[in-house]
Amino acid sequence: MFGTASSLKIGPYVVDPAVVLAPMAGITNVAFRTLCREFGSATSLYVCEMVTARAIVERDSKTMEMMTFGADESPRSLQLYSVDPKNVTDAVTIIAGEGLADHLDMNFGCPVPKVTRKGGGAALPYKRRLFAEIVRAAVRAAGDMPVTVKFRVGIDDEHLTYLDAGRIAEAEGAVAVALHARTAAQRYSGEADWSRISRLKEAVTSIPVLGNGDIFSAEDALRMMRETGCDGVVVGRGCLGRPWLFRELHAALTEQPVPAGPSLGEVAAILHRHAVLLADHLGEEKGLRDLRKHMAWYLRGFPIGSDLRKSFAMVSGLPELEDLLGQLDHDAPYPAEAEGPRGRQGSPGRVVLPEGWLDDPEDAAVPEGAELMHSGG
Ligand SMILES: Cc1cc2nc3c(=O)[nH]c(=O)nc-3n(C[C@H](O)[C@H](O)[C@H](O)COP(=O)(O)O)c2cc1C
């Protein structure tokens, strides 16, 4: 398989079209990935929720359950979080040795204070040597399994790290890099600065550069590729409650007409499919509880009374969900209000770092206590 003009290679895998479902904790489990894949291309890339290296080494049962993939899911794409080269070596040795995944993405983009305070996530690429050691450890232990690296622009506007991170990842054997074009200080607020993706593309020349941030429509994806020259797009919040965005992305990137958004009747069928997939994965009770967080996203902009909306947000079983779906106006067309930004936005804030973190970028000491959080956090 050679792929089309809009394809990209991640190690041995042709990603065609070059669309990636962004790893999202609490969202991109096997059920949601399956749904997105049913709308998109079977050869695009759909990344699992993040797991911590340490939790794999300890064989934490919740973490092992999160590493569930569909029977025909290929490549099985897993995101790993770590601050410690030793944990990375041990975890990736387990993953590769036991054939638990086909692709590894390393997470250096998390802006959550409880993570950056310990030197993890988006704080880590500031420590150039430690960052290099972590990527090197992953690549070495991964053997034939391709490793990619995902990061932000930097800690804040005064501490940009993305160009170094890109060059280091490239030198250490990563097969692609992905940039969420925000600083950690921005969190999810404001706008992603796509010009940074262009800069990264100039700095990293031998492996693909993927762009990420604020793709909420197929047109946004085309525009990012056009404006930045990136080799592929990574889509997160835009597909929350909108897995059919992958159908639209697929069409746009293969130069076909982009289909109109679904009617409320079609959304009802999709929501039901999501519920069944979640029930298969987690059991009906847990699965339906997990679905609640998706309800407002699915129903956004449609004419639905507030009582019915509330009932959706508290649904606890499949028969109840079916009853509620039956009460919707199935002919209601896809509303304009459902377009545009969705998902978390938050507000910018100072990035909390460990004491003295910015003193020496070459200090490779492993920060303490930064990997004790739960997988997917
Ligand atoms: C609910 C949620 C969970 C996320 N979890 C992760 C994660 O575990 N790992 C990661 O690298 N990024 C995570 N992200 C960031 C996304 O992968 C992506 O970089 C970010 O949302 C920007 O892309 P977007 O504008 O398309 O949403 C998460 C984002 C959201 C909204």
Image (tube, rainbow, N blue to C red):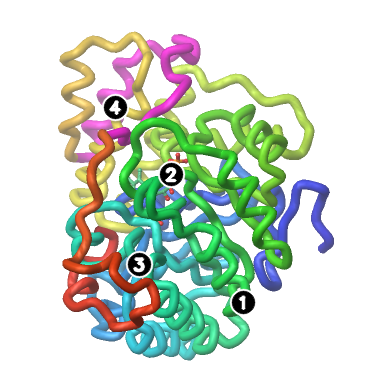
Task: Please tell me which residue is depicted at 76% across the width and 39% down the height of the picture.
Answer: 254
Lower sequence index among marks 3 and 1: 3
Q: Which residue type does callout 1 highlight?
A: Ala
Give residue 292's quadrant in the image: top left
User: Which residue, given by chain and number where applicable, does mark 4 sit on?
Assistant: 296
Which label is found at residue 182? 2
Percent position of residue 46, x then y: 52, 55
The image shows residue 265, relative to residue 116, as above or below, that is above
Which image quadrant: the C terminus? bottom left
The image shows residue 187, relative to residue 138, as above or below, that is above
| Real-space CA distance between mark 3 and mark 1, rounded to the nearest whole angstrom | 17 Å
Q: Which residue type does callout 4 highlight?
A: Ala
Does ligand 1 reach within 8 Å of label 2's beta carbon?
A: yes
Q: What are the residue bounds of the magenta stretch?
A: 317-346
| Real-space CA distance between mark 2 and mark 4, rounded to the nearest whole angstrom | 26 Å
Q: Relative to the observer, which residue lies in front, 321 or 79?
A: 79
Q: Which residue type does callout 2 highlight?
A: Arg
Which label is found at residue 124? 3
